[in-house]
Image (cartoon, rainbow, N blue to C red):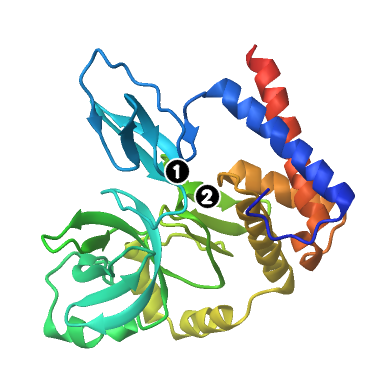
Amino acid sequence: MRGLQLPLSQTQRIRLQRAFEKLQSLSSKANSDASVTVADTIPVNYEDAFLKGHGTTDLNGELVATVCGVVERINKLVYVRGLRARYKPEVGDIVVGRVTEVAQKRWRLEINFSQYAVLMLSSMNMPDGIQRRRTALDELNMRGIFEENDVVCAEVRNFQHDGSLQLQARSQKYGKLEKGQLLMIDPYLVKKSKLHFHNLEQFGIDLILGRNGFVWVGEHVETRDSMLLDQANSSVQSMVLEEKNQTHTPLEMRQNICRIANAIRVLSTLGFSMDADLIVETVELSSSLKIDIHDMLGSEFHVLVAEREAERRSLMGKRRR
């Protein structure tokens, strides 16, 4: 409630506060020491040796938190992961970034990290789809692949000795993203899972939840086989049709993109973790109530989403019992 910047009426404020109190009681029952605030005591076994990590300190013989966040435990290490901190990459993370510079044999991307990420020319699929050595001609044509301000999806490959991050895009699902919106939310709202690419078939939308807090909502694009690219390039007529498709997006598709993007903005404002099912439910709620796209960002819809989420989690808790 403290961090919400919404023009709420007195009735809406009371309804929203009740919904958050219900959500907090449900989460505290599920995991008592998962989240902590400053000066909260972190339960540990003092008989076993443990290591104090980031966000913790020893106060009067107890381990207490010095930042607000989530308690993480790795073997003997106990630390607090700050919620509203910058993105901390891990190898294998799916990220969405924006190209800031085209350099020699590499692109530099902004991915909400303390340093720019690097995507090497040798770490991505070429447009012809053939696995081969990169030539001087490929380096000259780098701007034909990605240029400044292009939105790109990639995977975290490794860390360099200087702390910089190296990406790779050697799969058909990675690459340039077009015909959509790029949203920036807090990275802690995107949990690591096996699936970060979602095809919302009922809307014809591709949804990519980047671990760095960059979320892409765009028109669905079929992943084409590299063997078919040569046939497509040989036909002039298919190239003309493709150019027409690139410049035009139907009105209904643009409305779907905006509605899903606003649903994500509402969930982010309320501090709910991003999940494809939750996003679809929020979109369907707005459609069932016949709420216009621009009205989804109003105070009333925020309250309705919070109340609906509290009710949903309550029902899930009863079913588990």
For the question of whether residue 289 can be seen, the reply is no
Closest to the observer, 321 or 279: 321
- Residue 154 on image: x %, y %: 34, 60
- What mark, if any, has residue 198 been given in the picture? 2
Amino acid type for the residue under numbered disc 2 = His
Dividing the picture into quadrants, the one containing residue 165 is bottom left
Eyeballing the image, is 17 above or below 111?
A: above
Q: Residue at x 17, y 82 (%)?
A: 104
Q: Residue at x 47, y 53 (%)?
A: 84
Please give left or right for residue 137 compared with residue 7 in the image: left
Closest to the observer, 236 or 94: 94
Query: What is the crowding at mark 1: few (fewer than 14 residues within 10 Å), some, or many (at least 20)?
Result: few
Q: Residue at x 76, y 31 (%)?
A: 311
Q: Secondary structure at mark 2?
A: strand
Marks 2 and 1, how far apart at CA: 7 Å
Eyeballing the image, is 143 above or below 187?
A: below
- Residue 287 on image: x %, y %: 81, 53
Amino acid type for the residue under numbered disc 1 = Leu
Closest to the observer, 8 or 238: 8
Name the residue tied to disc 1: 195
- Residue 263 on image: x %, y %: 68, 56
Eyeballing the image, is 77 above or below 246?
A: above
**Marks 1 and 2: in contact by CB < 8 Å?**
yes
Please give left or right for residue 294 compared with residue 181 in the image: right
Q: Quadrant of the C terminus?
A: top right
Q: Secondary structure at mark 1?
A: loop
Q: Residue at x 39, y 64 (%)?
A: 112
